[in-house]
Image (spheres, coloured by chain):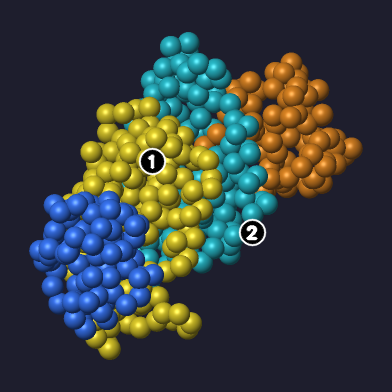
Chain colours: A cyan, B yellow, C orange, D blue
Amino acid sequence: MAIRVQAEDFDVGAELAALSDGNPSIGGVASFVGLVRDMSKGDGAGGDAVSALTLEHYPGMTERQLAAIEAEVRARWPLDAVLIIHRHGRLLPGDRIVLAACASAHRAAAFEACWFLMDWLKTKAPFWKQEETPDGARWVEAKEEDEHAADRWRQQAP
Amino acid sequence: MAIRVQAEDFDVGAELAALSDGNPSIGGVASFVGLVRDMSKGDGAGGDAVSALTLEHYPGMTERQLAAIEAEVRARWPLDAVLIIHRHGRLLPGDRIVLAACASAHRAAAFEACWFLMDWLKTKAPFWKQEETPDGARWVEAKEEDEHAADRWRQQAP
Amino acid sequence: MRILYFAWLRAKIGTAEEEVAPPAEVATTGDLITWLQSRGPAYADALANRAVVKVAVNQDYVGMDHPLAPGDEVALFPPVTGG
Amino acid sequence: MRILYFAWLRAKIGTAEEEVAPPAEVATTGDLITWLQSRGPAYADALANRAVVKVAVNQDYVGMDHPLAPGDEVALFPPVTGG
């Protein structure tokens, strides 16, 4: 099962290569790498400087929910391989947070499934971000736009 | 300008890292790696075994068209970086053909722009594939579904 | 019954995890939150706005009317912000 | 005028590139293809179905009514299949 929740960084090139390795029926791999931004997403004009980000998670539930979503994308789209790696702990701007990747014979399936995974991770995976700003540590608030992005997939048949 | 047309393979991890390196306002990088499949896309039940694929291109026009499409995605979506690497020459099943990657502060922009690039590459970039099959070498025919996929982007405002 | 708190709920309540034995009339997740609110100002403050309190029972999301059993692992946390 | 052929158009015509001097009445890309078709069976065969012949002039896609100038680089090729 290609799901990992870890504090360590990951090697994107090696992970993507391993995903398609040995299966020459795969036509392509769509992926998304999420990175720590140096600015909070403030409402209005810009945000505050972010010097670090700490990701808390719910061990056990995280893996359980990621496994469920992997099963769901595999049921909805014709995928040959799925990978989700999500880090926890303290990260710095520019650090990788998450990698989602979907391999398929079909380009559209790979893109849709990968995008769905990211929208799902933003709204359902039990992770919480705390930012370090000049005003102190602050929990990141969930964004309504992320809910809308995730809801989109309920209406669309694949 | 992050456009390369080359015979050599590329290092996906290094390329994606370089794309966001030094710009901590990037929230994520969406990418697609296209691979050589070991089966042709036959109409009907499956296809023929493909032992190799040769990509011919139009030197000069390729780079010119890729530069134009890079300018277009940058105009349509808020992107921090764009990368297109497309190989030519003889490739084997499992080999990487193409890498398209878009970095943005916004997840949706990165996904849409990358998907648009791939749909565009399939229908407008002057490359032609010739497959080696048990029945001999055969030029790959353009697929109507690729035209439909590309047309989609004309109707959608980003 | 084991209760876990995450993110600012954990910070406001001041603990990540506790064992509780609510009275018999606490039958659902909603009842549990009402009962927890009565346990002191930190709980009352942390749980004041239920619109921002998510509940999982045995590591699955549930609603506020989910029935509870004694051995359940209940988690309370704010809307998630991963990815 | 320089003409380039790619993929199966190149294979059928038997050359990747040639210099041609079409007569003065060849004013557009469509005229050029008609004139090329008259140059022999290989050309006639390769260019028989214009629906599958794409044209670029000076490395930009153009239609069949695009005007031609003597120094143009004209390319004829089938629908692309890259990516």
- Which amino acid, mark 2? Ala
Q: Position of residue A49 (x, y in %)?
A: 41, 17
Chain identity of mark 2: A
Residue farthest to the top, as pictured: A135
Q: Residue at x 28, y 74 (%)?
A: D47
Q: Are marks 1 and 2 on the same chain?
A: no
Chain identity of mark 1: B
Question: Which of the two residues, B110 or D34, is positioned nearer the viewer here?
Answer: D34
- Which amino acid, mark 1? Val
Give the foreground label among 1 and 2: 1
Q: Residue at x 51, y 45 (%)?
A: A118
Question: Which of the two residues, C38 or B105, is positioned nearer the viewer here?
Answer: B105
Q: Is residue C72 left or right of residue B82?
A: right
- SS for tag 1? helix
Question: Which of the two residues, A59 or A93, is positioned nearer the viewer here?
Answer: A93
Q: Is residue B11 visible?
A: no
Q: Residue at x 37, y 66 (%)?
A: A27
From the viewer's perspective, is residue D25 above or below residue C56? below
Q: Is residue B116 visible?
A: yes
From the viewer's perspective, is residue D60 above or below residue A42? below
Residue D33 marker:
none
Question: Which of the two residues, B50 or B29, is positioned nearer the viewer here?
Answer: B50
- SS for tag 2? loop
> From mark 1 to mark 2, how far is it between C-alphas?
27 Å
Q: Position of residue C26 (x, y in %)?
A: 85, 37
Residue A157 marker:
2
Few, some or many residues within 10 Å of mark 1 (<14, 14–19, 20+): many
From the viewer's perspective, is residue B56 above or below residue A118? below
Residue to which mark 1 is pinned: B73
Residue farthest to the bottom, as pictured: B135
Q: Is residue D6 left or right of residue B109?
A: left
